[in-house]
Amino acid sequence: MDPYKLNEDLKLGVATAATQIEGGDTNNSWYEWAQEKDHIIDGTTPLRANEHYKRYKEDIDLMKDLSIECYRFSIEWSRIEPEEGKFNLEAINHYIDEIKSLKEKNIEVLVTLHHFSNPLWFEEMGAFKSKKSIFFFTRYAMYVVQALKDYANEFITINEPNVYATNGYFFGIWPSGEKSFFSAVKVMKNLAKCHISSYNAIHKIIPNARVGFANHLAIFSPLREKSLYDKITCFLVAKFFQGALTDAMALGKFRFPFCFLSSKRGVYYDFIGINYYTRRAISGFNTTFFKNTAKNDLGWEIYPEGLGIIADEQYKKYKKEIYITENGTCDKEDAFRSKYIYDHLKEVSKRDFIKKYFYWTFMDNFEWAEGESAPFGIVKCDFPTQKRKIRKSGYFYKEIIDKKEVNCQMIDEFLK
Ligand code: BGC
């Protein structure tokens, strides 16, 4: 293992999402989804999570202990607008307070407006399957941005629209539970329109805001290298899952599978957000992982080169600064997380157009269908007692942030 230096102006931080950490809210689609048997592997719900809604001050202190420079977190829409058209001042004030506490500690914020969960009234009216979502989402986004405009100027409109749409409408393993290709396409199309409409609205409120979206971008490779069939399906899966949607969101280019003629073009991003985790092997229309490769505790391949490949592709195509808005791994014993961070940041160190990197995630949380059983955190959370403990990988990450390098001594201490 070699030492390396990171660019001095690279900001390093952590990312989280409201439903996964806050606890205490029963008015959202994920709480409701978790009530059904078998929806969540370990039977937990987001009601407890990390109790971060009330413990946010101590969590911010912990972030400071870790030298975190930037923090990506999300706003729970169901708290802000518990009933259609009724906005909750107390909830928005809570987030203002949270941002102020972060700023007091010199931690920059990147605010996500939508990260997988919906208010129940919105879910019941069909959520993003309905065209009305564009109006409702934009109105909510405007309310939040108007309230936060003196405290924040970087926003992500929608997190992983491709994962939201495919898991929730194609595979049916997340809310809404539907299994229809056409519904998934419709949802993606509306999400892209929601992004464009709120991108424009945010800029009207804060002209110099920096706004983007965070797509889940994976490397797709044909399982059987020489199979023409796998090559073709791999191309189609990549196009459907990420290429076409990124073009629709970033440029307003709605092409197949959304429609055949492109509509209004524009530039609807100020940076490109990449959530990168793994490489997937495609065989026919099935996705799997290559045998005999390093895997995390969920069986996902650990493929650090992929981060570099995707960042290069996105930069070449969209020509704006890149933020790695999520990158991390599930590792119960914290056995390979430090190495994961080392390898992925090494890719980042080679690219000065990557300006921010957010490790996913700050602490073990409610990991959607995996419930509390899949720890991604650099901080361990014991859910029943709510005790937080910085993991060894957390101390490693802190040293990287402090020194903006990985030196020989750190390699000896953390990676051997
Ligand atoms: C999501 C996170 C999630 C992480 C790990 C991403 O797809 O944005 O909410 O916890 O992956 O599965």
Image (cartoon, rainbow, N blue to C red):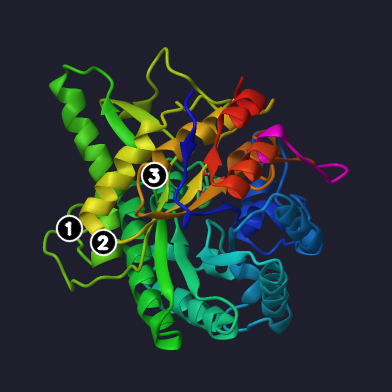
In the image, residue 354 above or below residue 203: above
Residue in the picture at 20% in, 36% down: 235
In the image, residue 115 above or below residue 196: above
Decide whether residue 387 is among the magenta residues.
yes
Q: Earlier in the sequence, mark 1 or mark 3?
A: 3
**Nearest the eye: 108 or 45:** 108
- The number of callouts visible is 3
Task: Determine if residue 5 is in view.
Answer: yes
**Nearest the eye: 215 or 391:** 391
Q: Residues within 10 Å of mark 1 (few under 14, many from 20)?
A: some
Disc 2: which residue: 248
Decide whether residue 75 is among the magenta residues.
no
Residue in the picture at 64% in, 54% down: 68
Q: Amino acid at mark 2?
A: Ala
User: Label 3 CB, ligand 1: below 8 Å?
Assistant: no
The C terminus - image quarter: top right
Question: What span is in magenta?
Answer: 383-394
